[in-house]
C-alpha cells in the first residue's frame, strides 16, 4: 500500500447513518477474483440509475468528488459484511480517510490494512462536518490529529502498529512472518491440539 | 485477581505473543473456514510472496456464497448452464486454489458441503474453546459452542493461511442476561432481533458478547447458533455461550470431534470454560423475554424492528429513518402485519438447520402457500438436505407449493442466481435487510421461520401464533 503521512482535502459528505458494506459494494460485484477496477462498483446502487447513468445528486457524483480524498459519513459507517472489497472500492475511487462518530469494527480493521484511515470524532465535530460539505480538513496520521478549517485540531485514536504500517506503506504480513519461531513454539507446547 | 470470563479464558489460551502499546497480540487460530468469495485475492497474495499454507489441516474449505442452488451436473457446461460466468469462474478458481495449496475442499458432490457456518458444527470441527475465523462476518455463529468465532477480511485470510495467526487487540466484554420463558410461536430469532432493536446495530461495537441466563440454557444448540449468528448485526466482534450438557451431546460422535480418551479430556476442558462466578464484564444488558412477541423488521437494518402486533415508529424527522421507510414503501405509525408478501425465503446461516425446517414443516403441513407468493426453502447443508428428505419434510414443502433447493447461501445475499426482483417484498429468515441485499431494489423483512411460514400461507405478513391456537 502507498505511504500516507497526511492528507488535506475538501470533504465529501454522505449524511446517512449505518451505511453497510452491502451499499459500499453490493454482493453481485464480489464475484471478482482480483481487485482491479473495483472502484467502479463503489456505492453502485446509490450512484447509478437502472440504465447505469450517474445520479446527479449523489455526493460522489458531484463535481470535484473524484478529486476529494476524505469522506465524512453518518454514524456506524461500514457495518455488516466483512468484505474487504469495501475499503478496496473506496481506495480505488480515491478515498483515503473516512470520518464518522462510529466506525464498525471489521470495516475499520480492513481499512487499516489498505491505507484507508478511519477517523472517529465526537458528535459535535461530526455534526459540524456533516453540515459543511466541502470543508477543507487535514487528516494527519503522523500526529494523529484532524485539523478543521477554523484552525482547531482534535486528536483521533488509531492503533499504533497500524499507524506505523500506514506511515511506512508496509503490510502487516511481514510482521507476522517475523514471529514464525514463536508460533512454532506455541504449537509444539500447547496443552491440547486443535 | 478476579475470576475470568469465558471469553477471557479462550483469549488467554491463544496469545502467542502478548500485545504491547506498539504492537497487537499475535493470536492463534484453531480453525480457519474458507469459501470462494473472500479468498481468491488472499491466495494471490501467497503466490506473489512465495508463501505456503502453514496448517492446511486446520482449514475447512467449502463453496456456498456464489454457488447455484439447483443441481450442478458437472463443473464444465453443467455449471455454466445454471450460473452466471463470474461466479462460475470464482468457483473454479476456488477448486484450483485448494488443489495448489493442499487444502481439502468440500465441493460439489461432497456429502459435507454446505454453508460455512452450518457445516463447521455439523462435522464437529466447531468445538468449545477454539478460535474460529472465516472471511464472513457471521463467523460469530460458532460462539454458540463456547468458541470465539469472528469475521475477518481477505488480508487477514491471507495472514491466517500463511501463519495460522492474526494480529489482534483484546476486545471489551459484554454480558447479555436473558431471562423468562418463551411463549409458543416465539423463536430464538425473535430474541436476537429484539436484542438488536434494544441495543442498536452499533450497540456491541468493540465488544465480545456472552449470552447468559436461564433462557439461553433452555435453548437447543441450533437456537443458540441463531442467536450467536446475528451478534454481528449488533456490531459486536463475537457472541459466545458457555458449553454445557447440550453442547457436549451435540458434539458427541461427530466426525471431527475427539474420540475415546481424548473425548473425556476434551469434555473436562470444555466444561471448565464457563465464566467464573466472580468474572466481570465491561458492560451488562438484561433482556426479559417472557412477554416477547414474534419480531419483524420494517426498515433497512436489523435494528429497525418491531413486535408483530405493534405499529412501526414515526421518526420522519430523521433523514436515515425516512430514507429507510421510503425504500421499504412502508408507512410510519402503521403495523407491518397484513403487508402484502411476494417472496418467502427460508434459509441462510441464521435459520437453515433441521429444527428450523421442522418448524416450517409443522406450519405448512396440509396447507398451501398463497398463489401470489413464491416460497424458497434452502437447506443449510447437504447433510441437512439428506436428513430433511429422510424425514419427508421436502414432500410437505413441495406439496404446499414451495421450492426445495440444493444447499447454499441462496437468496440471503443476492450474489448467486437466487435474487429478488425490483420492489419485491420478501419475508426472510436470513440476517440482513439492507437495501438491495437480496437483489437490487428488493425489500427484505427479517423474521423467524415460524413467521415466514405463516406469512407464506397468508400471502401477507402474519403472526404464527394465530396458527397454533
Image (spheres, grey):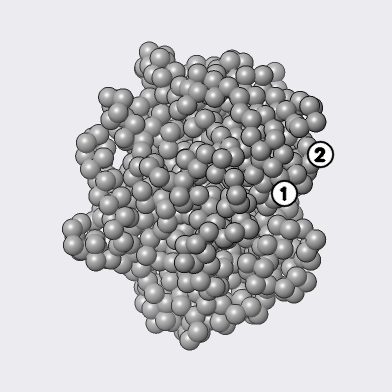
Q: Is residue A133 found left or right of B94 in the rendered image?
A: right
User: Label 1, label 2: how many angstroms apart (C-alpha)?
Assistant: 22 Å
Marked residue chain, label 2 = A
Residue at mark 2: A124
| SS state under label 2 | helix
Instruction: Give x and y (percent) for residue B308.
Output: 69, 70
> Quick one: A61 or B407, which is closer to the camera?
A61
Q: Is residue B231 found left or right of A128 in the rendered image?
A: left
Density class for disc 2 (Cα within 10 Å; few <14, some 14-19, many ≥20) is few
Q: Which residue is at 28% across, 30% downward?
A: B47
Q: Which residue is at 73% across, 25% downward?
A: A155
| Residue B117 position (above or below residue A145) | below
> Quick one: A180 or B314, which is closer to the camera?
B314
Q: Which residue is at 31% across, 25% downward?
A: B49
| SS state under label 1 | helix
Marked residue chain, label 1 = B
In which quadrant of the rendered image does the N terminus of chain B lie?
A: top right
The reply to whether dot 1 and dot 2 touch (C-beta < 8 Å) is: no
Instruction: Give x and y (percent) for residue B362.
Output: 50, 74
Residue B220 visible to an observer of this rendering: no
Q: Is residue B299 found left or right of A80 in the rendered image?
A: right
Instruction: Give x and y (percent) for residue A35.
Output: 39, 41
Q: Is residue B373 found left or right of A7 in the rendered image?
A: left
| Residue B395 position (above or below residue A72) | below
Quadrant assignment, res B54:
top left
Residue at mark 1: B199
Amino acid at each position: 500500500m502507498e505511504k500516507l503521512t497526511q492528507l488535506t482535502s475538501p470533504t465529501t459528505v454522505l449524511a446517512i447513518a449505518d451505511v453497510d458494506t452491502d451499499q459500499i459494494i453490493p454482493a453481485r460485484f464480489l464475484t471478482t477474483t482480483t481487485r482491479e477496477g473495483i472502484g467502479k462498483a463503489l456505492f453502485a446502487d446509490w450512484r447509478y440509475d437502472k440504465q447505469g447513468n450517474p445520479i446527479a445528486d449523489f455526493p460522489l457524483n458531484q463535481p470535484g468528488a473524484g478529486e476529494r480524498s476524505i469522506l465524512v459519513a453518518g454514524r456506524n459507517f461500514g457495518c455488516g459484511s466483512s468484505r474487504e472489497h469495501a475499503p478496496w472500492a473506496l481506495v480505488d475511487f480515491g478515498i483515503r480517510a473516512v470520518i464518522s462518530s462510529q466506525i464498525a469494527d471489521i470495516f475499520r480493521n480492513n481499512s487499516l490494512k489498505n491505507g484507508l484511515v478511519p477517523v472517529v470524532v465526537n458528535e459535535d465535530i461530526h455534526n459540524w462536518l456533516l453540515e459543511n460539505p466541502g470543508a477543507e480538513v487535514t487528516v494527519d496520521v503522523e500526529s494523529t490529529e484532524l485539523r478543521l478549517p477554523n484552525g482547531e485540531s482534535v486528536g483521533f485514536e488509531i492503533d499504533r502498529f497500524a499507524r506505523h504500517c500506514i506511515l511506512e506503506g508496509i503490510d502487516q504480513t511481514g510482521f507476522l512472518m517475523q514471529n514464525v519461531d514463536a508460533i512454532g513454539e506455541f504449537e509444539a507446547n500447547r496443552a491440547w491440539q486443535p | 485477581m478476579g475470576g475470568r470470563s469465558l471469553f477471557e479464558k479462550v483469549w488467554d489460551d491463544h496469545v502467542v505473543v502478548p500485545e504491547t502499546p506498539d504492537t497487537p497480540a499475535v493470536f492463534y487460530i484453531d480453525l480457519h473456514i474458507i469459501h470462494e468469495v473472500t479468498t481468491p485475492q488472499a491466495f494471490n497474495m501467497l503466490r506473489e510472496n512465495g508463501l505456503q499454507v502453514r496448517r492446511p489441516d486446520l482449514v475447512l474449505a467449502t463453496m456456498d456464497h456464489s454457488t447455484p442452488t439447483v443441481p450442478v451436473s458437472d463443473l464444465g457446461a453443467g455449471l455454466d448452464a445454471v450460473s452466471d460466468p463470474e461466479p462460475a469462474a470464482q468457483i473454479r478458481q476456488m477448486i484450483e486454489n485448494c488443489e495448489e495449496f493442499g487444502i481439502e475442499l468440500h465441493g460439489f458432490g461432497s456429502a459435507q458441503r454446505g454453508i460455512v457456518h452450518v457445516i463447521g458444527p455439523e462435522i464437529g470441527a466447531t468445538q468449545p474453546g477454539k478460535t474460529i475465523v472465516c472471511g464472513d462476518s457471521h463467523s460469530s455463529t460458532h460462539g454458540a459452542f463456547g468458541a470465539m468465532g469472528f469475521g475477518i477480511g481477505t488480508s487477514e485470510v491471507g495472514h491466517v493461511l500463511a501463519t495460522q495467526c492474526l494480529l489482534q487487540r483484546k476486545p471489551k466484554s459484554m454480558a447479555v442476561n436473558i431471562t423468562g420463558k418463551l411463549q409458543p410461536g416465539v423463536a430464538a430469532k425473535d430474541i436476537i432481533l429484539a436484542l438488536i432493536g434494544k441495543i442498536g446495530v452499533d450497540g456491541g461495537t468493540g465488544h465480545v458478547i456472552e449470552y447468559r441466563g436461564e433462557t439461553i440454557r433452555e435453548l437447543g444448540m441450533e437456537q443458540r447458533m441463531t442467536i450467536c449468528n446475528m451478534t454481528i448485526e449488533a456490531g459486536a466482534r463475537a457472541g459466545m455461550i458457555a458449553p454445557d450438557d447440550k453442547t457436549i451431546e451435540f458434539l458427541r460422535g461427530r466426525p471431527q470431534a475427539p474420540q475415546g480418551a481424548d473425548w473425556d479430556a476434551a469434555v473436562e476442558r470444555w466444561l471448565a470454560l464457563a465464566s467464573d462466578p466472580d468474572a466481570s464484564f465491561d458492560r451488562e444488558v438484561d433482556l426479559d423475554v417472557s412477554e416477547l412477541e414474534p419480531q419483524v423488521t420494517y426498515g433497512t437494518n436489523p435494528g429497525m424492528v418491531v413486535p408483530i402486533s405493534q405499529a412501526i415508529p414515526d421518526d420522519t424527522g430523521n433523514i436515515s429513518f425516512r430514507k429507510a421507510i421510503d425504500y421499504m414503501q412502508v408507512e410510519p405509525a402503521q403495523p407491518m402485519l397484513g403487508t402484502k408478501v411476494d417472496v418467502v425465503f427460508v434459509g441462510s446461516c441464521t435459520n437453515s438447520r433441521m429444527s428450523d425446517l421442522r418448524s416450517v414443516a409443522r406450519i405448512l403441513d396440509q396447507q398451501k402457500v398463497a398463489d401470489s407468493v413464491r416460497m424458497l426453502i434452502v437447506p443449510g447443508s447437504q447433510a441437512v438436505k439428506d436428513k430433511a428428505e429422510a424425514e419427508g419434510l421436502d414432500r410437505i414443502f413441495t406439496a404446499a407449493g414451495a421450492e426445495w433447493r440444493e444447499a447454499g447461501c441462496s437468496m440471503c445475499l443476492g450474489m448467486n442466481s437466487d435474487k429478488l426482483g425490483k420492489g419485491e417484498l420478501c419475508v426472510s429468515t436470513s440476517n440482513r435487510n439492507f437495501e438491495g441485499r437480496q437483489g437490487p431494489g428488493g425489500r427484505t423483512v427479517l423474521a423467524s421461520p415460524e413467521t415466514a411460514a405463516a406469512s407464506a400461507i397468508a400471502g401477507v405478513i402474519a403472526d404464527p401464533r394465530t396458527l397454533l391456537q
